[in-house]
Amino acid sequence: MKKLPVLLMAFLCVIFSASATTTNSSYEPENTFIGSWTIDVVGGGVSWLKVHEEQGVLDAELLWIGGSVLPVSDVYLVDENTLIVTRTSEVELKTTSGKERTHTRTWTMRITKRNDAIAGTMTGPTWEAVGENISFFTGTRMPAIGAAPDLSTLKYGKPIKLFNGKNLDGWRTIDPNSPNGFKVVNGTMQNDPVQPENGEHIYYGNLRTDQEFEDFNLKLEVNVPKGNNSGVYLKGIYEIQVVDSYGLELDSHYMGALYSRVTPSVHAEKPAGEWQSLDITLVDRHVTVILNGKKIIDNAPAEGPTGGAISSDVFAPGPIYLQGDHGNVAYRNIVLTPIIKK
């Protein structure tokens, strides 16, 4: 287990001791957990939880570090400041005979709240199904998103060319210890995460801009070979999916989607191997996406971070980052135009 920072340990001790008393079975607290929460996991990783209620019944959706926003298995109050959330998934485990059996694995979040801050633990089996993993986290309540902005009134600053077509100046891997699969080839930024024929899998790094931005319009072109996958992260928080999904049904995990959150309204993909254009506007936590000249997401609210986010602060400036740990992809003509706020 990783050693906790002193301030986090103190916070956990205070809020956990405040909820240590046994709950009376007749206790019916008002649920003050209702709403959305961004979560920072100790040791790295951003998560998100939304708790809502319908006719007295609690429900929730959870994003845990990576992957998709998913419904939880159960959610219930212990007392007015303590919430339990469970999440299950089915995995295939090999028996001693070599056959695979389906097992349901459960992870449990215990969340304690103090005002608009939370802290807690996520506990469950390790992926090897031997032993237990405990993650510690803190979080804050997210303010309501508010009404969609009027895009016709936006004012823009001077366009910024993020990629010069010659080298990777202005870009760096998010994790300096991860290998970089991106290189410049014929004026394009190409990612080629080559894996060894024999040996351990290499985890390539994601590439981010040195600069950080608030709200903006981002234009770029991307070429995705057949069966490959990448992503463009806005402020390091919201992923616009880049994937070969030509001919597939509309889905929140396919080309141009706000990953696992907003499904494109129409098909606009081109076949694999063709250059495609993305025109993306992020303003006041709302996203508009134009893919190959067709508007596929229209000023939709971004409820919270997507899987792989590097920051939980949706109001702070952040970088553009390109996924490099998935597959082959090429980018070119990457231009960001800041939106000027009054």
Image: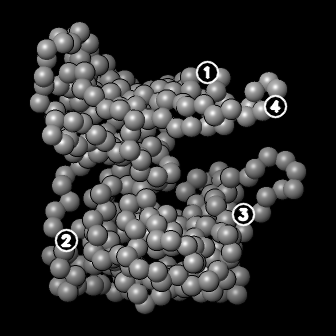
**How far across and how far down the image is residue 7, in percent?**
34, 28
User: Residue 99 lies in what quarter of the image?
Assistant: top right
Please tell me which of labels 4 and 2 falls first in the chain: 4
The residue that appears at 48% across and 35% down in the rendered structure is 88
**Label 3 sits on residue:** 193
User: Mark 1 belongs to which amino acid?
Assistant: Gly
Q: Residue at the spot x=49%, y=42% of the render?
A: 44
Picture residue at 64% right of the left edge, 27% below the top? 129
Mark 3 or 2, nearer chain start: 2
Which image quadrant is residue 193 in? Answer: bottom right
For residue 98, the mark is 4
How far is disc 1 from disc 3 in space, using C-alphas? 32 Å
Looking at the image, residue 211 lies above or below residue 68: below
Looking at marks 4 and 1 on the same chain, the residue that comes earlier in the sequence is marked by 4
- Reading the image, the residue beneath label 2 is 148
Tell me the number on the disc at residue 131: 1
Q: Earlier in the sequence, mark 1 or mark 2?
A: 1
